[in-house]
Structures are given as C-alpha cells and as structure tokens.
Image (spheres, rainbow, N blue to C red):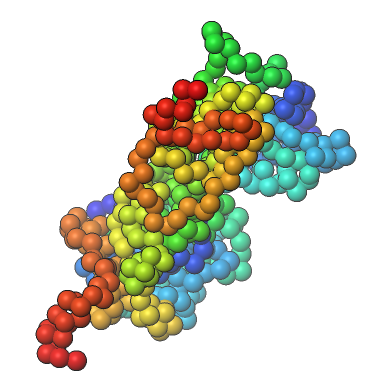
Amino acid sequence: MTAKTITITSGKGGVGKTTATANLAVSLASMGQKVTCIDGDIGLRNLDVVLGLENRIVYDLVDVVEERCRIRQAMIRDKRFEELYLIPAAQTRDKNAVSPTDMIKLANDLRDEMDWIIIDSPAGIERGFRNAIAPADEVIVVTNPDVSAVRDADRIIGIIEAEQKGPAKLIINRVNPQMIQRGDMMNADDVLELLAIKLIGVIPEDEHVIVSTNLGKPVALDEKSKAGEAFRNIARRFMGDEVPMMNLEYKDDIFHRLSKVFRTGGE
Amino acid sequence: MPGTRFPIKGFKEGLLIKLGDGSWNEVQANLLEQIEERLEFFQGAKIAVDVDERIVRAAEMGAMRDMLSDRGVHLFAVISKSNVTDSVAETLGLSTHQTILREKDSTVRNMLAGGENAILIRKTLRSGASIKYPGHVLVEGDVNPGAEILASGSIYIWGKLRGSAYAGIEGSENEVICALDFYPAQLRIANIVKEYPKLKIKIQKSRNHAQKANLFAGEIRVSNWDDQNLLK
C-alpha cells in the first residue's frame, strides 16, 4: 500500500487544525488503517497533547531531519490502536530547522508502510505552512463560520492553488446551530458562497472537545459527542463511504419540542 | 556568489532590479547586502525584482518582501517569465509584468478607436489578490472580499464583486465598474470614493441584477444594467 499524504491547514490560528488532525487520525486508525501524523508546528507543538502522548516524547521531527535518530525511533505508537503513530514537533527550534525537501523525503520514507500520513500545519502562510504542504497529495483547509476566519481561509486557498497543491477541500469547524438560526452566524452555504471549494465536513461546536483535549482523549473516541461523530464521518468519507452531512439545524419550534416530548416519553 | 551586485534601472513606478542566477538564498543575501550598502539611497524606494525564468514560492516571496520592508524598501512587483511565479505574485498582492504600469504611461486617454488595452482574468480573485493594469480589466470569476482591482480603464466582472474596484486610477472620469452581483467593499472612479456598508453574513442570494457604477454629478452612481437613466 502507498500512503496518501494529507495536510491540514487554515491560515488563521485557533480554528481547529490540530483537533482535526488528531481526530481524523484516530478515526482512521479505529477503522484498521495504518496512520502516522506529523506535528508541523515547530516551536509551538500541541498535537502530542491533544493525543495524550506528551509524556512519551523522546525524539522529534527535527531529530529525524538532522539524522540524530531513525524515523522509527521518533514515531510514538498510540497504544489505543494497532498502528497509529505520532512524530512530534520540536519545542525548542524554529520553522527554519526543517525544509520542504526534508518533509518530502520524510513522507517518502513512510509511504510504503502506511495508509495515511496526516500533517498538522502551523497557522500562517510562511515557512512552516510551506513545509507542511510540500509532501501533500491533498490539502484540507479548516475554517470557522465567521467572517475573519473565512477571509483568511480564502487567502490560503488562493496560495494553495498558486503553489499547485489545489484544489483544497474544506472542513467548517465550530458550527453553532442556535446562532445560525438567530442569524448571528454564517451557515455552510454562506461560507461556501465565498470559498467555493468542496466541503468534506461540518463539525458542530461541542463542549466535549475541550474536555477531551484536556484529557488527551480525542473526541472521536467519545460516542456521545456530536463533534466526534462528525470527525468519524469525515474519516469514512476519506475511505470512500458517501456519508451524508449531519443535520445541524436547530429547531426550536413547537412541533419539534412536542416531538421530543413524545420520543423521550415526556420530559 | 557573494559580492554580486545586481543591475538597477529606474523607471516611473520605481526601481527594477534584475536578480542573477544561483540559489534563492544566495541571491536574496546579495540583494539585501546591496541595499544595506546604500541604505539612505534605498530608503522608501519602491522596487520590482526581475526573476526571469525562476520559480519563486509564496513563502520565499513573502519572506523577501518582509526583509526588504525591514530595510525601508517596498517590494511592489515581481517580473518573471514563469506563469507559476506570476500566479504566486498575484496571490500575494504584488504586481507582475502584465499588470505593472508601463514607463511611458503618464495619462491614459480614452480613445474610441484602437489603442485601448484590456486584460482578461479567467479566475476568481481571492482575498489578498491585487490586479493593477493600465487599461480595462475583465474578470470571468468573482472578486472576493480582500481582493482588489486597480485599472486605468473600466472594470467588468462576470461574477460577484465583493472586494474593491478602482477604475480610472489615472484620472479618467468616464470609466465604469460593472458586475453581475454588485456588493463591493469600496469603489473608486478617478478621484471619487464610495464606501459600502459591511457585507452581511447572510448574503442576499436573490440580488442577481447586474449593475453598473459610473460618475454622475461628482458622485458614484450605481444603477441596474437596464436602467433607462443610464442612457443619458
């Protein structure tokens, strides 16, 4: 098998790239896929924390690139799965420690042993971003349904196209159906009207995400979490399964409140 | 190799520096040294770099622009023979050989017969893109918020206008701005500016009436394309 390399980026910081990387990796691994994720955010690493693997770091990406260790030594195996690995970022170096060519070589070295290589890109459009997209077969842009995030997403989609890594695909993260219904938040159509790329997933705002990050247990492992379910659906779409988008409409009218009463046998 | 000094030519828009061969890092280091040697001369200068056939990536171009800016020099254009490099430059809001105002153009006269230039752009202009052209600009695609078009002639957009459009930037007041879906951030025709209220997050989808902006009585007037008043 040769791995498909996917880079998750956004332009704007804090929209959910690392959460998406961790949860997609975990979802694919739980379907029996062989996955390595790579934290491209040198200097500000946090993919290790989201996966709960921070206490097991011995070697990191820069050690591999500078040949102080073999790739396998830097790959931390997530014991929850058959074959899920993390190559963490270095904390004490900067983005210039790694070059796009280094990243391409790294992905090539892993390609024959893996089904998926998922790279968590740092925010911005500079060296770290370029490193992260260099080996990508596909680039996924994560955005939030707000004007500022969408503006940055538009910019980065343009840059991805100019770098010949397009067309990018889109995940809209942190969707709040109540706010959409009130007219305070953009819905998916409003975002797509501007960004005009293929949408591969919509993730609802979900408190479980913060709780799970603190615990190092990605939310895709939580059956009760809607965000987790949405991430698992995206992973299924990667595998070719045509899962319909989750219905995130917030219905607060009399009919729905009544139907909830009947379904749960009364409040 | 170190110590190389690149030839500099002055023209109306600024200075044109032709970069030589070698690795991008070497060339960039040479350029920065060259500027540092005559810092006072380069202070506040606007420069275009000619990279010939070289392919320059977004981060490289962006980093060079920042490093030049740290030394008080404004990089405004990249002249190249590569479509990839041109595309990267446009995405970063830099001018390219197609869009740079030419040396001889001091004023562009509105001629009815021959001599009018136009450029056709067949893609959506995303946030950060900037197109500047000494003539008319036609876009087959959208102009997204954060993108801008500066034309000495008129601007015609076969798509949505959500960014900024400046027509008649050299002073010609007869220019127009047209779009199929008209909700710009800012319009300018010659010296007159019109700001628009912030775009609502719920885009009005039903407004599919093509519109045209022109100067009338010292103001920018926007009318539907089939408005009878336009005939006056």
Question: What x and y, as percent, mark residue B67?
Answer: 71, 46
Q: Can residue A137 be seen in this view?
A: no
Question: What x and y, as percent, mark residue B28?
Answer: 69, 39
Q: In this view, does A32 lie to the left or right of B215?
A: left
Which residue lies at the image location 53% right of the left edge and 23% below the top edge? Answer: B136
Q: Can residue A243 be seen in this view?
A: yes
- Pick whichever, B76 or A104, lies toward us: B76
- Pick whichever, B82 or B229, lies toward us: B229
- Pick whichever, B129 or B27, lies toward us: B129
Which residue lies at the image location 46% right of the left edge and 28% below the top edge? Answer: B229
Q: In the displayed structure, would residue B120 be above or below residue A215?
A: above
Residue A94 occupies which quadrant of the picture?
Answer: bottom right
Which residue lies at the image location 41% right of the left edge and 30% below the top edge? Answer: B227
Q: Which residue lies furthest to the top in this view?
A: B113
- Pick whichever, A26 or A167, lies toward us: A167
Quadrant in which the N terminus of chain B is drawn: top right
Question: What x and y, as percent, mark residue B181?
Answer: 40, 39
Which residue lies at the image location 50% right of the left edge and 43% below the top edge? Answer: B184
Q: Which residue lies furthest to the bottom in this view?
A: A267
Question: What x and y, as percent, mark residue A74?
Answer: 45, 68
Marks counted in the figure total: 0
Q: In the displayed structure, would residue A86 be above or below residue A199?
A: below
